[in-house]
Amino acid sequence: MNTLPLQYQSLKAVLLYMDPNVRFKISHRFPSISSTEKVVPLRIEELDLGDLTTTVNQTTYKLGIYREYKKGEKIPWRAQRYNDFGGFPYDFDRFGFEIFPGHNALNPGDVSLPCPYNLVSQVERDTVHIERMHRTRLKFYQNVLKTRLGSENVEISDGEGEDTILEHYYMSLPIEELERHIGEIYEDLQPFECRRFNLKPPFVCYIMLTITSKSHKEISLMPYNMKLHEAMKDLNSFLFGGRHQSIQVQKLQLSINGTILRLPVGFKIETEQLKGLNNLSMRHDAIISMLDKKSFPLKSVSFFADDEPDFQFSDMGKTKSFTAMDVNPEIDLFSILKTLSNQRVNLSFYDSDFGIGQYLGLVQSWIENERPIGTCYSFGIEEEDTARQILKLVRANVEGAKRSKRCVSIPIRNSARLELYYIPMKSLNDSEQEEFMYYCDWVLKMRVVRF
């Protein structure tokens, strides 16, 4: 049968409505249509950017270092685990030491996401002190193992100190777990031996790309001829680089840890929602630099509220809805809420110390300042009794307030009333429940409605 290739305009129409991950695959396998694919707007439902991962909708692209051990060499348990789950997340030098080349280097297009802490440890791993520490641990584990096997007695001290607790802990471990710990220390010591005798490690490194979706997992190994951050730059440049228009994303999520996003020059996103952000005040400029101006006003922003400046995200006032999760009880939250102009606000707390009197103060503020119709604030509540006490306090202290079983209604002007009521968490849909992090059983809502 003769088949005719799609004409240019038809191909563009097909690509526009195609799943983005299928587009990437087609562009990779058929370079002849790559330029056309870059012209057609890219539409993504959910995009999650990390240091070595990029997730497009429900497909994750992950980079790591795969270690292939030489024939006859026993693969250490820890190395096998890394190989099985996407590869080692840092680079290796020629002796097998972990290294961090260019980790903090900013190249054109890269976006730095600052963080008050950095979970990536960049301490030197190849010092004499580190080797001595490994050998001390090795001797301890070997002595414990000999005792457990009955070939030697090791005196375990009495008391409650940290060392004694560790000794008793390791004496209680299964034999195979002790042997695994010993194997891990031998693995840690191996680079020192390779450097001492100028030997190559017993493995060959490859860059591993793992593409994982709901129903499929694909692994590719490539020569280790560049560092991981360079490979990540190449990967994101292939996915997103050279596009003629901003990438259209419904929900954008960013790495929790402090990191540098390796992105192509000119990377821009037109988005509706920013989801699950950390350190929002510190990352404001970095986030804004990635967003097309057409993104504003944003439909919604959700973030973890650690500090008061997190609420000062300058573009949040242009956002219809925002969700603050795990609000730090040390924040003067209710003073902040009285100044916000957002139409919808959702708040969840963890081990909250907020008093019920503060809810009364917020109600009184809304009455005095006549919030617009449609304004609705929602609060995650752990105990139903807390919600009952809030309603009882408002009913007793606000003139004209009327209470039913789970609601207090207050006339605030001729055409509107303020309603304060609570409902079970299970009555919300899944996406709404997610905003309250699941540990609240009730939701207290405060809204302005028409009579």
Image: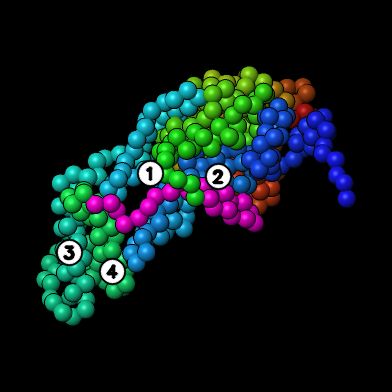
96 on left or right of 444:
left
Disc 4: which residue: 179
Q: Percent from the top left, x then y, of residue 398?
A: 62, 30
Which residue is rendered at x = 67% and y = 24% of the image? Answer: 245
Badge 4 amino acid: Glu
Which span is picked out in magenta? 199-220
**Label drawn at residue 90:** 1
Viewer-nearest of labels 3 and 4?
4
Mark 3 crowdedness (10 Å alpha carbons): few <14, some 14-19, many ≥20: some
Distance CA(mark 1)–CA(mark 4): 25 Å
List the single residue furthest toward the front: 2
Q: CA distance from mark 3 to mark 1?
A: 28 Å
Cα–Cα span, label 2 and label 3: 41 Å
Q: Is residue 401 visible?
A: no
Q: Specify the quadrant of the image occupied by residue 275.
A: top right
Q: Give me the residue at 63% from left, 36% from top.
A: 251
Q: Which residue is mark 2?
A: 61
Residue holding disc 3: 140
Query: Is 333 in front, or is 220?
Result: 220
Which dot, 1 or 4, sits closer to the camera? Answer: 1
Q: CA distance from mark 2 to mark 1?
A: 16 Å
Q: Give the residue at x 65% y 52%.
A: 426
Check the image and report above or below for 399 versus 144: above
Q: Which is closer to the viewer, label 2 or label 3? A: 2
Q: Is residue 339 magenta?
A: no
- Residue 431 is situated, as x and y percent measured from the top left of the image, at 65, 44
Q: Quadrant of the C terminus?
A: top right
| Disc 2/disc 4 C-alpha distance (Å) | 34 Å
Kind of residue sitting beneath label 3: Phe
